Amino acid sequence: MANVRDLKQRSDRVTAGMSLIDFRLRHVQADLRLLIPDADLELWPEVTPVMTKVDNFIVYDVNYYLTAQDAKGHKTVDFSATFTMVFDPAREYGDEDLEAFGSIGALSVAHPYVRELFHSLTSRMGLPPLLLEVMPPEPDVS
């Protein structure tokens, strides 16, 4: 079983040989569960990257799921979003290397857009603007 350090090294090797040729938001859903929440939302993010090979391209769907509850423990909002990235690899990579890139490198590309999307959505929903961490969550290697 790989550790996070090993995944980062594998991802870095692949990053140098990948060209991003398409990036798009494919799905977004936001459900406001509580109209007047107490401030200070507590978040539970979940991120799932999925890799597929299409012709000579590598496609990553990065799925974000986020649930928040307010200070009183009331479920306040649910979000989900999927960003799809298409990469043109400069050479052949093994599946383990491509999966490592998906769990770290591809997330680093998508995460700033996810941060902006969820921030904008919460503002438009009348909630305190949601600020996700600067870096995406590290992959679970357990």
Image (cartoon, grey):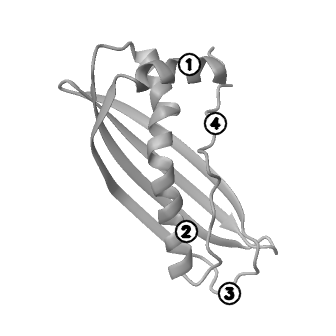
Q: Amino acid at mark 1?
A: Gln
* Residue 48, x across and y down, in percent: 51, 41
Viewport quadrant of the N terminus: top right
Circles 1 and 2, Cβ within 8 Å, touching? The answer is no
Q: Which residue is mark 2?
A: 119
Q: Examine the rendered structure and indicate whether residue 136 appears above or below residue 52.
A: below
* Residue identified by numbered label 4: 138
Q: Quadrant of the C terminus?
A: top right
Q: Which residue is mark 1?
A: 9
> Which amino acid, mark 3?
Ile
Q: Which mark is residue 68?
A: none
Q: CA distance from mark 1 to mark 2?
A: 31 Å
Mark 4 to mark 3 CA distance (whole Å): 32 Å
**Eyeballing the image, is 27 above or below 87?**
below
**Quadrant hosting residue 65:** bottom right
Query: Mark 1 vs mark 2: which is more N-terminal?
Result: 1
Residue with the mark numbered 3: 36
Using the numbered discs, state the Cα–Cα distance from disc 2 to disc 3 in whole angstroms.
18 Å
Neighbour tally class for label 1: few under 14, some 14-19, many 20 plus, Cα within 10 Å: some
What secondary structure is marked by label 4? loop
Mark 4 closeness class: few <14, some 14–19, many ≥20 residues within 10 Å? few
